[in-house]
Image: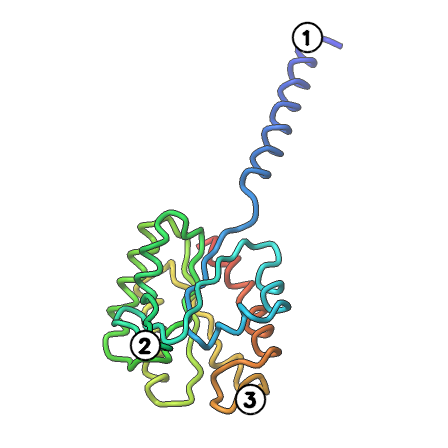
């Protein structure tokens, strides 16, 4: 074999090994899910967790009574961090994608500004995209919140709206309040969100 051919073969082998190493170092797509008690069922249902984490490394930070940026309400004597506080606290370990599903414990007032604060924090910490989940419109205030979410996508090209309100309409996935999820509902939400996470990583 000629010297030129040997050099070309050696170069190709080095590139192939480097590519494998790079892929191994990169690992699964990293994401963080910040939410309140509505999506929290995912954390307790093994099948739902497994569904969400197929090919993904998803950190779950789902807390009862969480609010977006206003002080969270109290549950069993303590109040969780706000969604903004949770995002800021993670720093560069936030991951490539942030999923937000918060808003059931507050009015729509100030939600628009809250979205902008969370977006700035997420992008400053290295997120490629944010998946923002719409609320089930069992009350008029939740419709107002959803309007704020939809409009935010016009301001932030890195924000991808996951319209859970439309997707879940008429489905038997909820408890008596029409919001909190059964085991089947938690798995359905996890399956619904996965393609959005992959898409948000490419925004």
Q: Quadrant of the C terminus?
A: bottom left
Task: Label 1, secondary structure: give it.
Answer: helix
Mark 3 or mark 1: whose residue is earlier in sequence: 1
Q: Residues within 10 Å of mark 2 (few under 14, many from 20)?
A: few
Quadrant in the rendering for residue 171:
bottom right
Query: Residue 109: x, y in percent?
Result: 24, 79
Which numbered mark, 3 or 1, is in the foreground of this view? 3
- Residue that carries the numbered disc 1 in the rendered image: 3
- Residue that carries the numbered disc 3 in the rendered image: 170
- Residue that carries the numbered disc 2 in the rendered image: 74
Task: Label 2, secondary structure: give it.
Answer: loop
Extreme residue toward the top, this view: 3
Mark 1 or mark 2: whose residue is earlier in sequence: 1
Mark 3 or mark 2: whose residue is earlier in sequence: 2
Quadrant in the rendering for residue 35:
bottom left
Task: Label 3, secondary structure: give it.
Answer: loop
189 up-or-down from 159: above or below:
below
Q: Residues within 10 Å of mark 3 (few under 14, many from 20)?
A: few
For the residues labelled 1 and 2, the Cα–Cα distance comes to 73 Å
Q: Quadrant of the N terminus?
A: top right
Is 159 left or right of 12, judged from the image as shown? left
Extreme residue toward the right, this view: 1
Task: Look at 32% across and 60% down and name the residue there.
Answer: 119
Query: Residue 121: x, y in percent?
Result: 30, 56
Color scheme of the displayed model: rainbow
Q: Are marks 1 and 2 in contact (CB under 8 Å)?
A: no
For the residues labelled 3 and 1, the Cα–Cα distance comes to 69 Å
Is 82 left or right of 189, judged from the image as shown? left
Is 73 left or right of 48, judged from the image as shown? left
Q: Nearer the viewer, residue 27 or 15?
A: 27
């Amino acid at each position: 074999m000629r010297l030129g051919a040997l050099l070309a073969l050696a170069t190709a082998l080095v590139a192939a090994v480097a590519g494998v190493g790079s892929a191994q170092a990169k690992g699964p797509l990293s994401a963080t899910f910040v939410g309140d008690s509505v999506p929290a069922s995912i954390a307790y249902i093994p099948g739902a967790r497994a569904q969400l984490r197929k090919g993904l490394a998803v950190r779950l930070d789902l807390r009862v009574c969480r609010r977006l940026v206003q002080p969270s309400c109290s549950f069993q004597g303590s109040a969780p961090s706000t969604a903004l506080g949770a995002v800021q606290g993670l720093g560069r370990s936030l991951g490539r994608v942030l999923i937000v599903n918060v808003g059931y414990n507050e009015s729509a007032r100030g939600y628009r500004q809250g979205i902008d604060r969370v977006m700035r924090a997420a992008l400053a910490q290295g997120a490629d995209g944010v998946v923002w989940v719409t609320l089930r419109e069992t009350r008029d205030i939740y419709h107002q919140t959803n309007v704020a979410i939809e409009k935010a996508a016009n301001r932030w090209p890195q924000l991808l709206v996951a319209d859970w309100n439309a997707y879940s309409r008429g489905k038997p996935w909820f408890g008596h309040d029409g919001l909190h999820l059964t085991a089947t509902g938690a798995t359905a939400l996890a399956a619904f969100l996965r393609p959005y996470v992959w898409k948000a990583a490419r925004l």
